[in-house]
Amino acid sequence: MGAPYVSIKRLVDNSLAAMLSAIEVYNKPRMTYRDEVTVMLVVNAWELALKAALRRENRSIFYTKKRGERYRSVTLDDALGRLNGHALWPKSIDGPAITANIKALSEYRDRAIHLYNAQGLGAVIYPFLQQNVLNFRDFMLEKFQKDLAESITWQLLPLGATAPADVVKFMKVDKSAPMVAEVEQFIGELRGYMDTAERAGADMSRVATVYDIHMRSTKKITSADLVVAISATGDGQVVVRKTDPNQTHPFSFAKLLEKVNEKRAGRELTSFDLQAICWKEPLRSNPKYAWKHSNGATHVWSGEAVSYLVSIVDADVERIRAEYIADRARVRQGR
């Protein structure tokens, strides 16, 4: 007996319905268990959407059937693995970044379902949740020509009695030892997902988005923003620690060039091209992109450097290259 028939249309419709329900729940003015229910629905929406995408490409969404057992559909992690493994993400979608975003929410979902103490983690998960909705809209529009924006009012704002706090610097947690351990463990899981995305040269703006009180997108979150510790003063404050550049800047110059060319839509860049770009743009002096130990001879590079270099179109590369060649000629002539 073959695997059961699965309607792609039904998967897509149910996925959209789950995401719309999540947005409605989150925007209710009075709602207990808000974060947990919202994330459960969001993760469910993605699981259905990913399975619909696999079915669209005639890929199985079931595990091999065992004798005497029913067919089991693949888990969220396996669905993500199959999309990444078969390069089934739409061209405009950064698979590693969106995978990190979904896994972050899935980790939170698992903690809520399995009775871990998830209270106090809402401030951490919010930027992932906000970006997830935007990622979902882009994915569904690109893959199935379904626009989530047609079904909701995008002008909704999370109004409240107090201004939203900075995700890291002002997150308050329960001072009890179990809660402190829970927060630290959860942050560690998030860092792992984000480090994986950064090492893949992912567009980190697809992972999480921070908004100021005027609701303007202010910056991308990297794993550096999630390296936190509980304050030793005992006030329950979460504070920022310095990060390990071996994690945040894992690429040598040669590896940076390799990663960039893996992801570029235009021609492959040469080491000379990168030298020219670094001459034109002060990439080596920007810690977001490059880091060098005070006693070191060379710089190491971050995933954000990969994303930035991938974004430079061929015409700009040629212009920068020409300017660099002209500048070197002037230097040789002593002008």
Image (spheres, grey):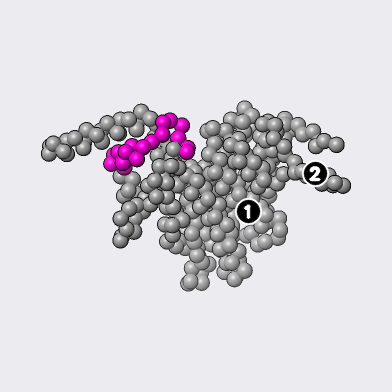
Label whose residue precedes the other's in the sequence (1 or 2): 2
The reply to whether residue 277 is visible in this rendering is no
At 59% across and 67% down in the image, what residue appears?
A: 181
Q: Main secondary structure of the magenta part?
A: helix
Which label sits on residue 65? 2
Closer-to-camera residue (67/189): 67
Asked where in the image residue 115 lies, by quadrant, the reply is: bottom right
Closer-to-camera residue (129/152): 129
Q: Is residue 141 above or below residue 39?
A: above
At 59% across and 41% down in the image, what residue appears?
A: 84
At 67% across and 31% down in the image, what residue appears?
A: 57
Q: Residues within 10 Å of mark 2 (few under 14, many from 20)?
A: some
Q: Please, which residue is most extreme toward the right here?
A: 68
| Circle 1 SS class | helix
Q: Is residue 182 above or below residue 92?
A: below
For the residues carrying marks 1 and 2, which lies nearer the camera in this image? 2
Asked if the magenta segment contains residue 254, the reply would be: no
The stretch of residues the image draws in magenta is 262-281
> x and y percent of residue 26 in the render?
63, 46
| Circle 2 SS class | loop
Residue identified by numbered label 1: 107
Q: Amino acid at mark 2?
A: Lys
> x and y percent of residue 138 in the render?
57, 34
